[in-house]
Amino acid sequence: MKKHLFYTFLFLFIATAVITLVGITRLIPIDEFYLKGLFSSLILELCGAVIFIYRKADFFDDAPKSNLSLASLDVVENAKICNTRYLDQKVSEIEDSAPTAMTVEEVIESINAAPPFQKKEISEKYIGLVFEKVGYLKKIDTDWNDKSKVRVNIHLEKGGIVGHSIWFSTTLDEYPELKVLTKDSAIKVKGKLLSASAEGLSITLQPIKIEILGSNKSVNSQLSMATETPLR
Protein backbone atom coordinates (compact mmCIF):
# COMPACT_ATOMS: atom_id res chain seq x y z
CA MET A 1 0.00 0.00 0.00
CA LYS A 2 2.83 2.41 0.87
CA LYS A 3 4.56 1.73 -2.45
CA HIS A 4 1.37 2.51 -4.39
CA LEU A 5 0.95 5.84 -2.58
CA PHE A 6 4.60 6.72 -3.15
CA TYR A 7 4.45 6.09 -6.88
CA THR A 8 1.09 7.89 -7.16
CA PHE A 9 2.44 11.05 -5.56
CA LEU A 10 5.64 10.76 -7.59
CA PHE A 11 3.62 10.53 -10.82
CA LEU A 12 1.48 13.55 -9.87
CA PHE A 13 4.60 15.55 -8.99
CA ILE A 14 6.32 14.71 -12.29
CA ALA A 15 3.15 15.43 -14.30
CA THR A 16 2.67 18.79 -12.56
CA ALA A 17 6.33 19.71 -13.12
CA VAL A 18 6.28 18.74 -16.83
CA ILE A 19 3.03 20.54 -17.61
CA THR A 20 4.12 23.66 -15.69
CA LEU A 21 7.52 23.79 -17.41
CA VAL A 22 5.96 23.23 -20.84
CA GLY A 23 3.45 26.03 -20.14
CA ILE A 24 6.12 28.44 -18.92
CA THR A 25 8.30 27.84 -22.00
CA ARG A 26 5.21 28.36 -24.21
CA LEU A 27 5.62 24.98 -25.90
CA ILE A 28 1.96 24.39 -25.20
CA PRO A 29 -0.42 27.32 -24.86
CA ILE A 30 -1.94 27.33 -21.34
CA ASP A 31 -4.23 30.01 -19.98
CA GLU A 32 -2.52 32.33 -17.47
CA PHE A 33 -5.07 31.46 -14.75
CA TYR A 34 -4.33 27.73 -14.93
CA LEU A 35 -0.61 28.31 -15.37
CA LYS A 36 -0.47 30.26 -12.12
CA GLY A 37 -2.30 27.43 -10.37
CA LEU A 38 0.08 24.81 -11.79
CA PHE A 39 3.10 26.89 -10.79
CA SER A 40 1.78 27.33 -7.24
CA SER A 41 1.10 23.60 -6.98
CA LEU A 42 4.62 22.81 -8.16
CA ILE A 43 6.16 25.17 -5.57
CA LEU A 44 4.04 23.65 -2.77
CA GLU A 45 4.99 20.11 -3.77
CA LEU A 46 8.69 21.04 -3.84
CA CYS A 47 8.44 22.67 -0.40
CA GLY A 48 6.60 19.66 1.00
CA ALA A 49 9.15 17.21 -0.40
CA VAL A 50 12.09 19.20 0.96
CA ILE A 51 10.51 19.52 4.43
CA PHE A 52 9.67 15.79 4.52
CA ILE A 53 13.19 14.76 3.52
CA TYR A 54 14.73 17.21 6.03
CA ARG A 55 12.63 15.83 8.90
CA LYS A 56 13.28 12.15 8.12
CA ALA A 57 16.97 12.28 7.18
CA ASP A 58 19.75 12.21 9.82
CA PHE A 59 22.46 14.05 7.96
CA PHE A 60 25.16 13.91 10.65
CA ASP A 61 24.08 11.28 13.22
CA ASP A 62 23.98 8.09 11.15
CA ALA A 63 27.50 6.89 11.90
CA PRO A 64 27.53 7.65 15.66
CA LYS A 65 24.13 5.97 16.18
CA SER A 66 25.22 2.93 14.24
CA ASN A 67 28.43 2.67 16.23
CA LEU A 68 26.56 3.18 19.47
CA SER A 69 24.06 0.45 18.59
CA LEU A 70 26.85 -1.97 17.74
CA ALA A 71 28.66 -1.10 20.96
CA SER A 72 25.47 -1.65 22.97
CA LEU A 73 24.94 -5.05 21.35
CA ASP A 74 28.52 -6.01 22.14
CA VAL A 75 28.07 -4.99 25.76
CA VAL A 76 24.85 -7.02 26.08
CA GLU A 77 26.43 -10.09 24.47
CA ASN A 78 29.52 -9.83 26.68
CA ALA A 79 27.31 -9.48 29.75
CA LYS A 80 25.38 -12.62 28.79
CA ILE A 81 28.60 -14.56 28.26
CA CYS A 82 30.00 -13.36 31.60
CA ASN A 83 26.78 -14.26 33.45
CA THR A 84 26.74 -17.73 31.89
CA ARG A 85 30.37 -18.34 32.83
CA TYR A 86 29.74 -17.03 36.36
CA LEU A 87 26.76 -19.34 36.87
CA ASP A 88 28.65 -22.33 35.47
CA GLN A 89 31.55 -21.54 37.79
CA LYS A 90 29.24 -21.23 40.80
CA VAL A 91 27.53 -24.54 40.03
CA SER A 92 30.92 -26.18 39.66
CA GLU A 93 32.09 -24.69 42.95
CA ILE A 94 28.99 -25.96 44.76
CA GLU A 95 29.30 -29.46 43.30
CA ASP A 96 33.01 -29.63 44.11
CA SER A 97 32.77 -27.96 47.52
CA ALA A 98 34.37 -30.00 50.27
CA PRO A 99 32.02 -31.28 52.99
CA THR A 100 32.48 -29.91 56.47
CA ALA A 101 34.37 -31.91 59.07
CA MET A 102 31.56 -31.34 61.57
CA THR A 103 29.09 -34.11 62.23
CA VAL A 104 25.33 -33.82 62.51
CA GLU A 105 25.63 -34.82 66.16
CA GLU A 106 28.03 -31.92 66.86
CA VAL A 107 25.69 -29.41 65.26
CA ILE A 108 22.70 -30.65 67.28
CA GLU A 109 24.68 -30.76 70.55
CA SER A 110 25.99 -27.23 69.95
CA ILE A 111 22.44 -25.91 69.55
CA ASN A 112 21.14 -27.84 72.55
CA ALA A 113 23.99 -26.52 74.73
CA ALA A 114 23.11 -22.90 73.95
CA PRO A 115 20.75 -20.85 76.16
CA PRO A 116 17.12 -21.05 74.95
CA PHE A 117 17.11 -17.49 73.62
CA GLN A 118 20.30 -18.10 71.61
CA LYS A 119 19.36 -21.45 70.08
CA LYS A 120 17.97 -19.89 66.88
CA GLU A 121 21.03 -17.65 66.48
CA ILE A 122 23.41 -20.58 66.96
CA SER A 123 21.51 -22.79 64.48
CA GLU A 124 21.61 -20.06 61.82
CA LYS A 125 25.41 -19.96 62.01
CA TYR A 126 25.57 -23.44 60.49
CA ILE A 127 23.42 -22.56 57.45
CA GLY A 128 25.35 -23.10 54.23
CA LEU A 129 27.70 -25.79 55.55
CA VAL A 130 28.06 -28.71 53.15
CA PHE A 131 27.42 -32.19 54.55
CA GLU A 132 27.97 -35.52 52.82
CA LYS A 133 26.48 -38.40 54.77
CA VAL A 134 25.18 -41.92 54.32
CA GLY A 135 21.86 -42.61 55.96
CA TYR A 136 19.12 -45.21 55.99
CA LEU A 137 15.65 -44.58 54.65
CA LYS A 138 12.95 -44.06 57.26
CA LYS A 139 10.24 -41.96 55.67
CA ILE A 140 9.11 -40.44 52.37
CA ASP A 141 6.25 -37.94 52.26
CA THR A 142 4.93 -35.36 49.83
CA ASP A 143 6.69 -32.04 50.43
CA TRP A 144 4.11 -29.65 51.88
CA ASN A 145 5.95 -26.66 50.39
CA ASP A 146 6.08 -28.10 46.86
CA LYS A 147 3.62 -30.84 45.91
CA SER A 148 5.76 -31.84 42.93
CA LYS A 149 8.52 -33.01 45.30
CA VAL A 150 8.89 -35.61 48.03
CA ARG A 151 10.49 -35.06 51.42
CA VAL A 152 12.91 -37.83 52.41
CA ASN A 153 14.12 -38.67 55.91
CA ILE A 154 17.20 -40.83 56.49
CA HIS A 155 18.59 -41.91 59.88
CA LEU A 156 22.34 -41.97 60.41
CA GLU A 157 22.12 -45.24 62.36
CA LYS A 158 20.63 -48.23 60.64
CA GLY A 159 17.66 -49.74 62.45
CA GLY A 160 17.41 -46.91 64.95
CA ILE A 161 13.96 -45.72 65.96
CA VAL A 162 15.05 -42.43 67.47
CA GLY A 163 18.29 -40.72 66.54
CA HIS A 164 19.98 -38.11 64.42
CA SER A 165 18.59 -37.82 60.93
CA ILE A 166 18.69 -35.80 57.72
CA TRP A 167 15.79 -34.40 55.71
CA PHE A 168 15.97 -33.39 52.06
CA SER A 169 13.55 -32.82 49.18
CA THR A 170 13.77 -34.07 45.61
CA THR A 171 11.55 -35.18 42.72
CA LEU A 172 10.46 -38.70 41.84
CA ASP A 173 11.08 -37.92 38.18
CA GLU A 174 14.75 -37.42 38.94
CA TYR A 175 15.01 -40.37 41.33
CA PRO A 176 12.24 -42.87 40.46
CA GLU A 177 14.02 -45.51 42.59
CA LEU A 178 12.55 -43.84 45.66
CA LYS A 179 9.11 -45.19 44.70
CA VAL A 180 10.14 -48.76 45.49
CA LEU A 181 13.01 -48.22 47.92
CA THR A 182 12.56 -50.32 51.05
CA LYS A 183 13.00 -49.16 54.62
CA ASP A 184 16.61 -48.91 55.86
CA SER A 185 17.93 -48.75 52.29
CA ALA A 186 21.21 -46.83 52.19
CA ILE A 187 21.20 -43.36 50.62
CA LYS A 188 24.19 -41.05 50.29
CA VAL A 189 23.35 -37.35 50.14
CA LYS A 190 25.53 -34.29 49.71
CA GLY A 191 23.96 -30.90 50.31
CA LYS A 192 23.97 -27.49 51.93
CA LEU A 193 22.43 -27.08 55.35
CA LEU A 194 19.18 -25.12 55.25
CA SER A 195 18.09 -25.54 58.87
CA ALA A 196 18.77 -27.54 62.01
CA SER A 197 16.28 -28.74 64.60
CA ALA A 198 17.71 -29.50 68.01
CA GLU A 199 14.36 -30.84 69.28
CA GLY A 200 13.97 -33.10 66.25
CA LEU A 201 17.64 -34.15 66.29
CA SER A 202 17.74 -33.47 62.56
CA ILE A 203 19.07 -31.18 59.87
CA THR A 204 17.55 -30.24 56.52
CA LEU A 205 19.76 -30.17 53.43
CA GLN A 206 19.40 -28.67 49.99
CA PRO A 207 20.69 -31.65 47.99
CA ILE A 208 23.57 -31.20 45.58
CA LYS A 209 24.04 -34.89 44.86
CA ILE A 210 21.99 -37.96 45.82
CA GLU A 211 23.21 -41.52 45.41
CA ILE A 212 21.09 -44.60 46.01
CA LEU A 213 23.42 -47.21 47.52
CA GLY A 214 22.92 -50.95 47.97
CA SER A 215 21.89 -53.41 45.26
CA ASN A 216 21.03 -51.40 42.15
CA LYS A 217 19.87 -54.58 40.40
CA SER A 218 17.22 -55.29 43.01
CA VAL A 219 16.04 -51.69 42.96
CA ASN A 220 15.85 -51.67 39.17
CA SER A 221 13.95 -54.97 39.06
CA GLN A 222 11.42 -53.71 41.61
CA LEU A 223 11.06 -50.46 39.69
CA SER A 224 10.40 -52.30 36.42
CA MET A 225 7.81 -54.51 38.13
CA ALA A 226 6.09 -51.46 39.59
CA THR A 227 5.91 -49.66 36.23
CA GLU A 228 5.18 -52.69 34.01
CA THR A 229 1.64 -52.99 32.70
CA PRO A 230 0.36 -56.59 32.88
CA LEU A 231 -0.78 -58.17 29.59
CA ARG A 232 -4.30 -59.47 29.40
Image: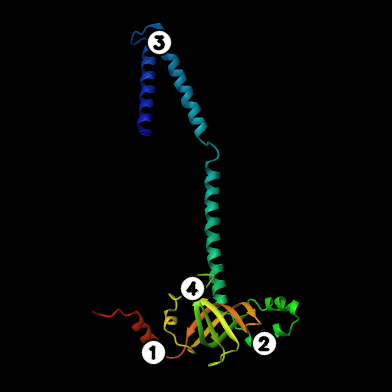
Q: Residues within 10 Å of mark 3 (few under 14, many from 20)?
A: some
Measured in 3D between alpha carbons, the distance from the residue under mark 1 to the one under mark 3, in whole angstroms, is: 104 Å
Q: Pick whichever, 106 or 181, lies toward us.
A: 181
The residue that label 4 is drawn on is 149
The residue that label 1 is drawn on is 218
At a point 45% along the width and 87% down the height, the residue shown is 182
Residue type (three-letter) at the residue carrying disc 2: Glu
The residue that label 3 is drawn on is 35
User: Which of disc 3 and disc 4 is earlier in sequence?
Assistant: 3
| On screen, residue 213 above or below 193 | below
Q: Marks 3 and 4: in contact by CB < 8 Å?
A: no
The residue that label 2 is drawn on is 106
Measured in 3D between alpha carbons, the distance from the residue under mark 1 to the one under mark 4, in whole angstroms, is: 24 Å
Q: Nearer the viewer, mark 2 or mark 4?
A: 4
Residue type (three-letter) at the residue carrying disc 3: Leu
Q: Pick whichever, 93 or 79, lies toward us.
A: 93
Where, quadrant-wise, is the C terminus in this rendering?
bottom left
User: Which of disc 4 and disc 1 is earlier in sequence?
Assistant: 4
- Res 214 quadrant in image: bottom left
Measured in 3D between alpha carbons, the distance from the residue under mark 2 to the one under mark 4, in whole angstroms, is: 29 Å
At a point 49% along the width and 80% down the height, the residue shown is 140
- The picture places residue 222, in percent across and down from the top left corner, at 37, 86
Q: Residues within 10 Å of mark 1 (few under 14, many from 20)?
A: few
At a point 42% along the width and 12% down the height, the residue shown is 37
User: Which of disc 3 and disc 1 is earlier in sequence?
Assistant: 3
User: Which of disc 4 and disc 2 is earlier in sequence?
Assistant: 2
Residue type (three-letter) at the residue carrying disc 1: Ser
Q: Pick whichever, 109 or 94, lies toward us.
A: 109
